[in-house]
């Protein structure tokens, strides 16, 4: 099997997100948050959430933001490793771009909800000494994507604002596509089971 992403349909690799609309006032949480995160104008009606639930939602978003920032840094390590071939590198950078979009949207939403977005760490502890070949980089990325899937699966039911849960589920879908593509390129079954956990 060739180590290339080019055989995968481009539409299956990319979830377009646009950021539109803003919220006026913190009492209506999901109007700006959902429009900003998912570009879903129809969901911008808003849901009222109390201050304690708002604080919890912001904490969940910041946890997700931290993971997205880590993924951006990890894909940078892979891109700079010199181990990714011509067919793989552009898609790895595309996946990194998705994580950048997720991070930017989540950070903006945290701010709109009155919170302070977490910042990227100055340094991440990645197993760079174990990255000796393209397959090592792809397995590393696949492991991070699998972790992101699990994290979003755990977070979705915790949101008080159900619209935020829906957007988190949308991001989860993007992470699952990344994982499946990486597994496919590694010659592994892209969808190894009928359920994720």
Image (tube, rainbow, N blue to C red):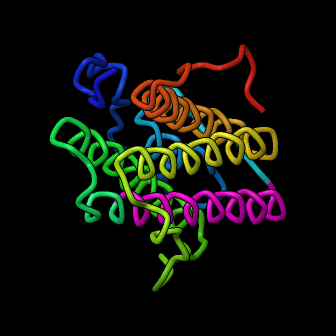
> Is residue 76 part of the magenta span, yes or no?
no
Where residue 154 appears, as percent x and y from the top left, is: 78, 44
Where residue 169 appears, as percent x and y from the top left, is: 62, 33
Quadrant occupied by the C terminus: top right
Q: In this view, does 193 lie above or below 141?
A: above
Q: How many marks?
A: 0
Query: Furthest-bottom residue in view?
Result: 122
Where residue 92 appears, as percent x and y from the top left, is: 31, 45
Q: Which residue is drawn at 27% across and 54% down?
A: 83
Foreground pick, 30 / 177: 177
Query: Furthest-left residue in view?
Result: 86
> Is residue 72 part of the magenta span, yes or no?
yes
Quadrant occupied by the N terminus: top left
Q: In this view, does 167 lie above or below 66?
A: above
Q: Residue at x 66, y 56 (%)?
A: 27
Relative to 38, is 197 on the left or the right? right
Foreground pick, 71 / 109: 71
Q: Quadrant of residue 165?
A: top right
Relative to 130, is 51 on the left or the right? right
Q: In this view, does 6 lie above or below 48?
A: above
Where residue 57 appears, as percent x and y from the top left, is: 72, 56
Magenta residues span 50-75
User: Mostly what secondary structure, the magenta segment?
Assistant: helix
Q: Quadrant of residue 53?
A: bottom right
Relative to 147, is 98 on the left or the right? left
Q: Residue at x 32, y 39 (%)?
A: 18
Q: Which residue is drawn at 50% across and 80% down?
A: 121
């Amino acid at each position: 099997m060739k180590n290339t992403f080019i055989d995968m349909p481009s539409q299956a690799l990319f979830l377009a997100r646009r950021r539109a609309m803003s919220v006026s006032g913190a009492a209506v949480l999901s109007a700006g948050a959902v429009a900003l995160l998912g570009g879903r104008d129809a969901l911008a009606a808003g849901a009222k959430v109390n201050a304690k639930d708002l604080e919890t939602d912001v904490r969940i978003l910041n946890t997700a933001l931290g993971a997205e920032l880590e993924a951006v840094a990890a894909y940078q390590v892979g891109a700079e490793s010199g181990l990714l071939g011509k067919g793989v590198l552009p898609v790895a950078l595309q996946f990194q771009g998705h994580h950048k979009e997720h991070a930017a949207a989540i950070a903006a939403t945290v701010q709109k909800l009155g919170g302070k977005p977490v910042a990227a760490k100055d340094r991440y502890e990645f197993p760079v000494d174990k990255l000796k070949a393209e397959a090592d980089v792809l397995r590393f990325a696949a492991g991070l994507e699998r972790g992101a899937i699990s994290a979003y699966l755990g977070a979705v039911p915790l949101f008080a604002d159900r619209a935020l849960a829906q957007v988190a589920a949308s991001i989860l879908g993007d992470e699952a596509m990344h994982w499946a593509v990486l597994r496919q390129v590694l010659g592994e079954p892209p969808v190894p089971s009928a359920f994720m956990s």
